[in-house]
Image: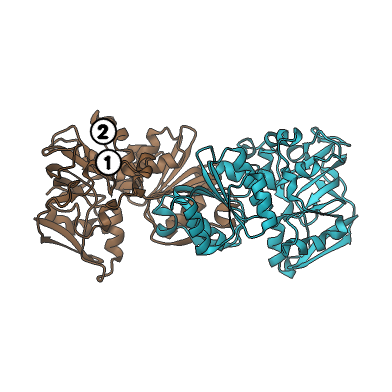
Chain colours: A brown, B cyan
Amino acid sequence: MRAALMYGAGDVRVENVADPVIKHPTDAVVRITAAAVCGSDLHLFNSLSPTAGPLRMGHEFVGVVEDTGSEVTTVKRGDLVVSPFAISDNTCEFCREGLQTSCTHPEANYWDFKPDEGAQAEAIRVTLADGSLVKLPVAADSALVPSLLTLSDVYCTGHRAAVLGGVDEHTRVTVIGDGAVGLMAVLSAKLLGAEQIILMGRHPDRTDLGREFGATDIVAARGAEGIEAVRELTGGQGTHTVIEAVGHLPAYEQAVGVVRAGGIISRIGVPQYEEAPIGMASLFMRNVCLTGGLAPVRAYIDELMPAILDGTIEPGKVFDTTTDVDGVPAGYRSMADRQSLKILVKP
Amino acid sequence: MRAALMYGAGDVRVENVADPVIKHPTDAVVRITAAAVCGSDLHLFNSLSPTAGPLRMGHEFVGVVEDTGSEVTTVKRGDLVVSPFAISDNTCEFCREGLQTSCTHPEANYWDFKPDEGAQAEAIRVTLADGSLVKLPVAADSALVPSLLTLSDVYCTGHRAAVLGGVDEHTRVTVIGDGAVGLMAVLSAKLLGAEQIILMGRHPDRTDLGREFGATDIVAARGAEGIEAVRELTGGQGTHTVIEAVGHLPAYEQAVGVVRAGGIISRIGVPQYEEAPIGMASLFMRNVCLTGGLAPVRAYIDELMPAILDGTIEPGKVFDTTTDVDGVPAGYRSMADRQSLKILVKP
């Protein structure tokens, strides 16, 4: 089958690889019908060392179950399923608390850390199929599939950021970053009733979609100028919640600059830094809380699916480009160049 | 009157200074009957540049109102009062939310930042007396005064750390630091019902008091060894809540090491660092939340006072040394040398 591999920064290739087969009784093999390129893939696309590659890429997919191991009971051949980006048994202590990203099962993993599997391909072997896969009650060719695909990562991730940020009808929110996750955070903040949603982004086509999802204000400026603009929009105080959906240090510093005293910075952009300011001047004196992390997407799929199925929301609007597996390398370049917002891969 | 001034690291002197007088209609002058030396004073005692001094010291006191400005209505001459370490009007937007440390009144301040006033003295001028001072329903010579004095900072601060840390009857807690604030955090976690309270501290007399306040386990080791010990006490997972009551970077790193995935690090030790690890490896991958900050003590005084008045708790046990104002310099040295846990100053 065809599959995308990243050999190093800027170097994604599509090659013929072996078809996946069942290896463990808890496995399923899924024929992929829709996958995506994620903003977090771009971090690797910008930084991967050639000695670390090649990596099989992709952690968001919808597909049809083709085969199952002997112990799999919740999905069967022919089911359309979606997978979260973390593989978990959904039964351990952490999974039961809704933190499937910290599943203690020895086979628990992230697609990104599995060198032999990736979703930017024609098929995939899913370990812990019972814990990870969720059946979708539509056909593989349903027009709802792009929106349901966002349950694999970006919509659930944006939703969690808004939940951890304490968003309710009394909350003013800043979302930093107009990528797919930032836009999903805007949509989620809107659904949670946020009073004001300021989207910080520089790409008019994206911020236009942000307005459609519920942003009340757009701030294109960055750094000190952007911080000043948000403060002007909030009576000088900043916002109760700041959702940081970029992952680079300047975005974090911007978050510190626009958060209201006593407020919450909720991070979903995968940090491309380890050290950052958290002392007296940045967080402590103003009692700012820093939350977020790798989202346990599996915990939110069932809760968020109905509004997609009944057409209330259409998070799949973040996909503005569709390609096949052979088009994945061009898709990476297009996203990296900010020509595409998010790539839908239809093998 | 006599007052303590810090001229630089290690250099505290007691001098004759002018008696305080009313300057603004919202002022009160308070004759101090009990004050304290704080662990955060010790940070300055270890680091103050001689060019930054001399500073009038002390931010925790109980005393008798001696005079009031024309606009003061909530306290009157002769009242015994306690003051939080932050001065606030208690009416602004932030004060109404319980974040008096971010009061927007132009006169809002911290005692530590007021070069002309300090509580390690015979008397003090209190700006925003109505917003800051709280009347105590006991006599100045009551045996309850040491415990009521802890409402000015350390008990309310420890309580807030436990509250922000989400402590309830299902929570396992680590408290890092056996100073007064750490011990108050132990007491607070116990009162909130914590299932397990691990106190990390190296001074047996202090950790003994910690056990009395509710600690279930003591870990004297620090660094990697201390982290390993806490993990062993918690089935390998670490604790849901970690209260960091030291303020030095190694204590923060220890907090990262002992916090359970999905858990909360609640900081009350005033950070003596600005940059620290918060990226993928430290917080993000395990969804650890970092909260805390300068505690808005005023928000908790009324709530926490009754259990002191009725004798249910005795937080004043953290005072193990009593001195007069002239003994304050020796008190600093004694606390810095870990000979004294906390100094009670009786002018």
Q: Residue B26's quadrant in the figure?
A: top right
Q: Is residue B43 left or right of residue B78?
A: left
Left or right: where does residue A226 sit relative to residue A178?
right
Q: Is residue B48 above or below residue A270?
A: below
Where residue A61 sits: x, y (%)?
A: 20, 46
1 and 2 marks in contact (CB < 8 Å): yes
Looking at the image, can residue A84 be seen?
A: yes
Question: CA–CA distance between discs 1 and 2?
Answer: 10 Å
Q: What kind of residue is marked 1? A: Leu
Residue at the image position 65 percent from the left and 53 percent from the top:
B207
Residue A209, image quadrant: top left
Circle 2 residue: A308
**Is B305 situated above or below B282?**
above
State whether discs 1 and 2 lie on one chain: yes
Where is B111 relative to B223, above or below? above
What residue is disc 1 on? A151
Which one is nearer the viewer's eye here, B278 or B253?
B253
Residue B149 image point, x, y percent:
76, 44
**Left or right of B142 on screen, residue B38:** left
Q: Is residue A238 visible?
A: no
Looking at this view, is B309 or B100 the one in front?
Answer: B309
Image quadrant in which the N terminus of chain A is located: bottom left
